[in-house]
Every structure is written in C-alpha cells, then in structure tokens.
Amino acid sequence: MQQPQDIPVAPVPTHANGWLWLPLVLAIGAAAAAMTLESDTPPPLAAWLTLPFVLLVGGVLAMAMRRRAIVLDNRELQVRATFYTKRFAIEAIDLDKARVVSLEEHTELSPTLKTNGFSLPGFKAGHFRLRNLGKAFCLVTDRTRALALPLRDGSLVLVGNFEVDVEHQQRIGHLFGPMPKEMRDDTAFMDRIHAF
C-alpha cells in the first residue's frame, strides 16, 4: 500500500482575507453603534449576542479557508477546498485534454456562478458553473495559472497554483515533479501543457 502523497498548494492571497474580515468588522461596528445610541429602552440581550456570533462566523470561515490540500492516495486524487472535498480516480481524468491555463486569457473556464462553494476575490473553492456553462470543482487561489483537469464524466477540476520553487525543482528534476506520478510521467500530458 502506497503512502499518501501531499501536493503543495499555494497560499490564499492576503487580500482575500481582507475581503472576508472587512464586511464582518463593518457589521460589528454598525451593530455596536446602533445598540449604544441613546434610547428609552436598552437593547435586548439577543442583540448583544450577535456581536460574538459574527466574530465566531468570521473565525469559522477563516479556518475553512486554511483547509486546502491536494492528496494522491492509492490512485485516487483528493482535492480539499474549505468545506468541500472532491475524490476521483486517476483513471477518471482525461489526461489528453488536461492543461495549465491562465483564467484571465481563457475566460470560458473562469468560475462564474457559485452553485455550492466559497468565493472571495482571489479565492474560489467548491462547485461552480464556468463561463461556458460547464460544471467545475475549483480550488483556485491564482487566476494566472490553473491546472484544468477534465474528467470523463464531462465535468472539470480547476486547481490553482501549486506551491513550487521553480529553480529548486529544475535542479532536482523537472517542474512536474510535485504532480502525481501518472501525470508527471505522461509525455502527452506534458506536450499539452507546453503548448500553452
């Protein structure tokens, strides 16, 4: 039995965390200001409980954003993205059509409609409809470089930006070294990626 292989994923952009916390802090400030205004009746206890509840929601969402992983375990690829996980066999990937794309150039593959996912500017995780109306499971932290893995069932897995030190990887092997063996050693897959 083979040990699970973790494939490093790039960190979430710092501005995505700002987009998470800014609305929550503004909501807390507005609620606190509204409750401290002078009035004849004091605010109910339930109103004061909303402040720690909003902080708790922010904490849960921030922890969920840290749950990002790509794991190869016994010929099964697992993509974990916040609250969502997609598992599929390596054989389910149509490697002839897999490629690395820039979502800014190939806008038809851009995650557009969130069907069951988590989305902030610079971060997409979960199930989305693409601009071309196809279905995709996404873990995208960088729109400039994403690996598009088409599955044989017609859906797509978009995985954004592996965390790879390019110079080190070129010295010890090649840039596909962190990828699963089935992709790393497939010359047809490499040819498709080199075309971009």
Image: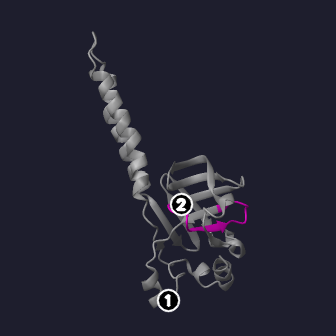
Rendering coords of residue 99 (x, y %): 65, 72
Residue identifier under label 1:
173
- In the displayed structure image, the side of residue 98 where residue 167 appears, left or right: left
Q: Quadrant of the rendered structure where residue 74 is? A: bottom right
Color style of the picture: one colour
Q: Which amino acid does the dot numbered 1 rest on?
A: Gly
Q: Secondary structure at mark 1?
A: loop
Estimate the x, y position of residue 29 in percent, counting from the top left.
32, 33
- Image quarter of residue 77: bottom right
Residue drawn at (59%, 74%) of the image: 75
Give the image location of residue 115, x and y in percent.
62, 46
Question: Where does the magenta region start and end?
Answer: 141-156
- What's the amino acid at mark 2? Val
Q: Nearer the viewer, residue 180 or 120?
A: 120
Element marked by disc 2: strand
* Label annotation for residue 140: 2
Q: Quadrant of residue 91?
A: bottom right
